[in-house]
Image (tube, rainbow, N blue to C red):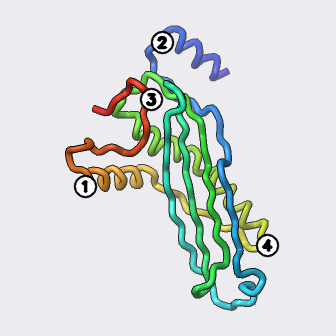
């Protein structure tokens, strides 16, 4: 019913902003346990390191892919218990959105929508190793986006205008 309302509104006002998630998919998943089964004999507790990267690209004029890649490295001492790398992707329809709002949509809103799927996939993969699942903490994608923009501004002050690295569709420019 809401899709019909959105289509009716779009027909009445063709310049109205459009933002829809079209598809969510697990783009890549890798799990390694290089020291199994000997590592299971260790008594020490594991240390977990998590890194997160956000990406995006234009697929067509109003169709974009947003991705989140998480790498989880869990070690006991200097030995790797497990290493999980996963990329969750999503396809989004974005139209009639001002250029200055596109990067925040792709860098904050889309990853926020994709993250629960990614966290569930990682927890499921780890559970399949017979180890307790790892439940990833919530992520403040706005803070990550702002940090990335600040780093980009420092790396190229004024020459790139704070380019976030996201690829815009043809004809769309940053202001």
Q: Nearer the viewer, residue 38 or 97?
A: 38
Which residue lies at the image location 36% right of the left edge and 53% below the top edge?
A: 148
* Residue linked to disc 4: 130
* Residue linked to disc 2: 14
- CA gap, disc 1 and disc 4: 45 Å
Q: Quadrant of the C terminus?
A: top left
Q: Residue 41: horizontal and vertical position, in percent?
A: 75, 89
Which residue lies at the image location 62% right of the left edge and 61% below the top edge?
A: 85
Q: Which mark is residue 154?
A: 1
Q: Going by the picture, which residue comes out furthest to the top? A: 12
Relative to 63, 105 lies left or right = left
Q: Which mark is residue 169?
A: 3
Relative to 157, 35 lies left or right = right
For marks 4 and 2 on the same chain, the one whose residue lies earlier in the sequence: 2
Q: Name the image quarter holding residue 63.
A: top right
- CA gap, disc 1 and disc 3: 25 Å
Q: Nearer the viewer, residue 40 or 33?
A: 33
């Amino acid at each position: 019913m809401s899709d019909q309302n959105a289509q009716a509104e779009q027909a009445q006002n063709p310049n109205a902003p459009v933002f829809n998630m079209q598809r969510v998919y697990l783009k890549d998943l890798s799990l390694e346990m290089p020291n199994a089964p000997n590592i299971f004999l260790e008594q020490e507790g594991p240390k977990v390191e998590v890194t997160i990267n956000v990406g995006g690209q234009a697929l067509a004029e109003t169709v974009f892919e947003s991705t989140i890649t998480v790498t989880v490295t869990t070690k006991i001492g200097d030995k790797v218990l497990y290493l999980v790398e996963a990329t969750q992707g999503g396809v989004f329809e974005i139209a009639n959105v001002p250029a200055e709002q596109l990067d925040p949509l792709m860098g904050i809103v889309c990853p926020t929508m994709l993250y629960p799927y990614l966290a569930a996939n990682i927890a499921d993969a780890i559970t399949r190793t017979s180890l307790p699942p790892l439940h990833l903490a919530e992520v403040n994608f706005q803070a990550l986006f702002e940090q990335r923009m600040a780093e980009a501004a420092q790396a190229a002050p004024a020459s790139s205008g704070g380019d976030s690295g996201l690829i815009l569709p043809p004809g769309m420019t940053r202001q």
